Amino acid sequence: MEEQELPYVLIDTIGGTHGVYEDHVEFLKKHFTLITMKEFLENKNHLSEKIKAIYMWWHKPAANQELLHSLPNLKMIVTSGAGVDHLDLKLISSFGVKVANTPFAVSSATADLGMVLMLASARRLVEGCQIAVSPNTEHFAADWLGDEVTGATLGIIGMGSIGYMVAKRAKAFEMKILYHNRNQRKEEEERAVGAIYCKKIEDLLQQSDFVMLVVNLTPQTDKLFGKKELELMKPSATLINISRGPVVDQDALVEALQNGVIKAAALDVTYPEPLPRHHPLLKLKNIIITPHIGSATTSSRRLTMQNMVESILAALNGFPIPNEVIP
Amino acid sequence: MFRVKAFCLIEAIHLATGCPRLAGRLIHPAVVCHVHHWTKRSTDSMWSYRTGPNSSGEAGVSALQTKIMEQGELPVLLVNEVGGVRGVLKAHVEFLKKHFHLITMKEFLKNKKHWSKKVQAIYLWWHKPIIDRELLESLPDLKVIANSGVGMDHLDLKLISSFGVKMANAPHAVSSSTADTGMALLLASARRLVEGCQTAVSPDTECFADDLLGDEVTGATLGIIGMGSIGYKIALRAKAFEMKILYHNRNRRTEEEERAVGAIYCTKIEDLLQQSDFVMLVVSLTPQTHKLIGKRELELMKPTATLINISRGPVVDQDALVEALQTGVIKAAALDVTYPEPLPRDHPLLKLKNILITPHLGIKTDKTTRMITEEAVANILAALNGLPIPNEVFP
């Protein structure tokens, strides 16, 4: 039998702070010959024409003009996670290269994180943990209270697959669910989670105790949430962002939190990530920030990797590509 | 029994909140007689059931209000303190004063002679005032002790009953917010939330390394030990996260109840422990549940599993837990309750990395604390007016 080489796939690096996971390598090597950026740069002449796909793990390696030029046989770029805002889709398409992401692999983990940010913020969990272990704690004060989640109103902005999963979870907490989306969902879908469509975002903002942002970052959603939106929110309401930092006008948010225009915020995403250490958001008491861990579970990362492999294999074999992103 | 309980609750709540219409519709002479027979088995000689077959709902609240006004003064309610660390919430005082003449322990002790015979009810807040023989002996006209919250493990129920004093707790008010707390602890622990928050704000953070991987909650197996109303609400929530739900309880729930949340009964606690990714304790503290989870139970759990305790500290053998967490017998723990509360500042649990501890915040929301006081007031008013107490607790 002829020994065929496995297709050459470019990755950034293995291990380290952002590299492909060491325990994913075995699976990847079953299907591909992995070339790291370092190896590629050291041997460009030999490898240039062999690389058929880029396996972009947490935005690396970056698909810029220079790289695309140097890979004449590149067929596919697959990126981990749901977001594609870090890619110049038009540019990539102009090279005849296809793109795929992994929106479904990350959706339940991200929905779960949205829920825990809401619960943790409402019930003052992080503060509570600090009190429980602080060397100064002598007693637990009776009048230290949080906000009830059960029965409260949740407004979901962006009712894609992640937003819908959030709605399913919130329903079990007997929350009243309002949503705003480019398109209204089907009646059965709405009924299944008890969600009420708000054509005007204002209606959602004025009624919600918790507002959760679950949109993609696009030119339309960039700074979707600014001073006007924050002022429409109840002063007792909390903003939760699990989409992308730039969806929120961060300066407006700082001001709103400082002046009690809204009660609190919980952000898994900011811009940049991480925030500069002197950023005013880090000094506020009525905010919790997590380091973009929306999809950070062992199993969701494994599923992400598997989805990426499937997409590359489909592209290289001329099959319809799962999770293809059309520019 | 259920109808009667429902009737009692609605009636008493409307007594407390002053809405006679519903009470009027629901009180029927036949039901009243029924209740009389049902409660008689648990009564002591001091309790007299004063409303007879002729009483009707419309008379309900207005009659009671008239009665109160006829007496010229509101019944005296003893609380430990108002405000401060463990006192009754200041925000609740106005509501309490609508129905009672409120005195604190300090005022009582200052003028024991005057207040002794007047105190008819005690409202406990965070387990205070302490109900001992001395206090009970000094309150000859005490009719009822109403507890805030559901746990009664801090009370000597037999002793109190021997004085002919009734007791009540507030089980309905607490269930949702405690269930929410259980879910919050489960999720926060699994997703390493507190660690993440620390990283996000730490002055040393230069970049977010992709190393804060947590455990997936969606689709994982949750074992609920104690499937009372709080446990069941947790099952309802966990189902929405597509969790596989196992439960262990003194009694099995009905088939419909199990089906509604997809819960599988484990007769043997071992079966639950061996299969669960998350084990949640939602039992009352009783002599049977004291140190329910010890070395043996922890060793039966998966080494990748997390223990969550929202019941009472003493349900867990704390020393065994420390050891299990230190040696990786289980992966992590999340405790809203410990013993004592707070833990001494040098306690080994506070030094562990794989633990989350919260300051008994299970019921600590504006809404729930208000509902607790409303439920307690309904219980007290029922007791003082010789009506069946909605949430009576028997020794």
Image (spheres, coloured by chain):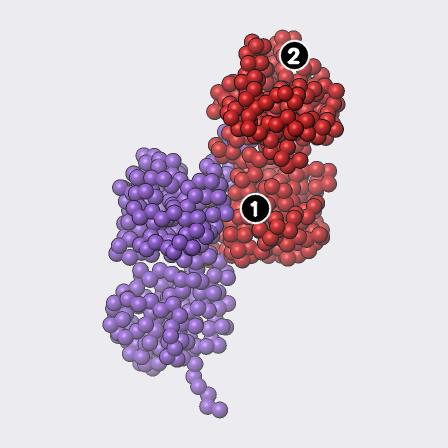
Chain colours: A purple, B red
Could you say which disc has been placed on residue A83 in the image?
A: none
Q: Position of residue B182 (x, y in %)?
A: 55, 44
Q: Are the two marked residues, 2 and 1, in contact with CB atoms closer than 8 angstroms?
A: no
Q: Is residue A176 left or right of residue A271?
A: right
Which residue is located at x 52 percent, y 24 percent?
A: B20
Relative to B32, is A8 on the left or the right? left
Instruction: Answer left or right for A82 relative to B283.
Output: left
Nearer to me, B130 or A177: A177
Residue to which mark 2 is pinned: B116
Judging from the image, mark 2 belongs to the subunit labelled B
Dividing the image into 4 quarters, which one contains the C terminus of chain B?
top right
The spot of residue A276 in percent (x, y) is 33, 48
Q: Position of residue B82 (x, y in %)?
A: 53, 21
Marks 2, 1: nearer the viewer: 1
- At horizontal 43% and vertical 84% (from top left) the residue drawn is A5
Q: Amino acid at mark 2?
A: Ser
Residue in the picture at 54% in, 52% down: B239
SS class, disc 1:
helix
Q: Nearer the viewer, residue B276 or B96?
A: B96
Q: Which residue is mark 1?
A: B234
**Can residue A318 be seen from the camera position used here?**
yes
Q: Amino acid at mark 1?
A: Ile
Q: Are marks 2 and 1 on the same chain?
A: yes
Question: Who's the residue at 74% across and 23% down the image?
Answer: B44
* Residue A268 or residue B201, whichever sits in front: A268
